[in-house]
Image: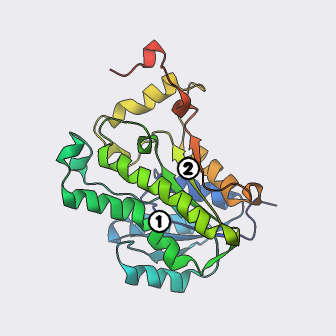
């Protein structure tokens, strides 16, 4: 018996096998979940369909979170859901370096729409698909609450996403639907590599964290399994850190001190 036997979970945000969403999907499947996957655009469709084949023949739907017609089509096809994983974010590369005050109006609005409002849009269109007691998870990062140089507008968008998680948790709590965020440590993905200076982050986390290591997408997936399962029925409106304890450090060992 798996922790997620009989549960159907929709996972967004898979771009390739290195995506955090990919690690989550594989762990959910390993514990018995039936999956529904989405993709945005032809560029990643093949990768998502390959994942679907590897994950028990998961259903696949195109979904552009900036278009209500696309969200309506997803809701019409996805069926009943016991979980939703929001792993969607986008910031223009030029806004992931330099000064925050140089961010363009268009860049700010785009980052907020795709990285934060998309959770509201997904839940709004899928709320009738969600079974009572379902679990919603959003992927966030430490830069939403603390300064991470060059994360810039991405961090501001993550702060908005985390606040959205709390307010959705309140709105959906009467149905027993939990809404939480997972804050992962720095993992090498196509998106994270866009952040200037990212290449040095994993080693610094490994040197400074209490567990003296960095984390993997599989580690994040294990947390997602817990949040999707009935073990977490009273856990909601919170941010769960999967970063080997790095977020709790107030002073770093000399070898890991930022330079």
Residue at left offset 40%, top offset 32%:
201
Q: Is residue 248 above or below residue 242?
A: above
Q: Residues within 10 Å of mark 1 (few under 14, many from 20)?
A: many
Residue at 49%, 39% in the rendered image = 185
Residue at the spot of label 2: 182
Circle 2 Cα neighbour tier, 10 Å, few/some/many (<14 / 14–19 / ≥20): many
Which secondary structure, mark 2? strand
Q: Which mark is residue 111?
A: none
Q: Which quadrant of the figure contains the N terminus? A: bottom right
Figure check: 189 above or below 124: above
Asked whether 73 or 16 is in front, the reply is 73
- Please tell me whether residue 22 is drawn above or below residue 143 in the rendered image: below
Element class at badge 1: helix
Residue 108 visible somewhere in the drawing? yes
Residue 254 screen position, x and y as percent: 44, 13
Label 1 belongs to which residue? 119
> Percent position (x, y) of residue 168?
55, 65
The x, y position of residue 195, in whole percent, is: 31, 42
Q: Residue at x 68, y 57 (%)?
A: 30
Q: Earlier in the sequence, mark 2 or mark 1?
A: 1
Exactly how many numbered labels are in the figure? 2
Q: Which of 242/171 is in front?
A: 171
Q: Is residue 53 rendered to the left or right of residue 100?
A: right
State the image quarter where residue 179 is shown. Answer: bottom right
């Amino acid at each position: 018996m798996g922790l997620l036997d009989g549960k159907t979970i929709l996972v967004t945000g898979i771009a390739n096998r290195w995506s955090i969403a990919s690690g989550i999907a594989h762990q959910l499947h390993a514990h018995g979940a039936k999956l529904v996957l989405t993709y945005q655009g032809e560029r990643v469709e093949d990768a998502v369909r390959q994942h679907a084949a590897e994950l028990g023949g998961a259903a696949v739907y195109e979904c552009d979170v900036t278009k209500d017609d696309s969200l309506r089509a997803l809701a019409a096809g996805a069926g009943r859901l016991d979980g939703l994983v929001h792993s969607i974010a986008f910031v223009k590369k030029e806004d992931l370096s330099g000064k925050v005050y140089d961010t363009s109006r268009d860049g700010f609005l785009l980052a907020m729409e795709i990285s934060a409002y998309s959770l509201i849009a997904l839940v709004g269109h899928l709320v009738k698909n969600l079974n009572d007691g379902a679990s919603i998870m959003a992927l966030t990062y430490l830069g939403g609450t603390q300064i991470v140089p060059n994360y810039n507008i991405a961090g501001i968008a993550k702060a908005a996403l985390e606040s959205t998680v709390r307010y959705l948790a309140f709105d959906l709590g009467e149905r027993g639907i939990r809404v939480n965020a997972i804050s992962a440590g720095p993992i090498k993905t196509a998106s994270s590599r866009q952040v200037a200076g990212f290449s040095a982050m994993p080693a610094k986390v490994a040197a400074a964290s209490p567990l003296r290591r960095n984390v993997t997408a599989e580690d994040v997936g294990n947390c997602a399994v817990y949040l999707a399962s009935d073990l977490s029925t009273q856990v909601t409106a919170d941010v769960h850190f999967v970063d080997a304890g790095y977020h709790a450090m107030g002073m770093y060992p000399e070898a890991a001190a930022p330079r």
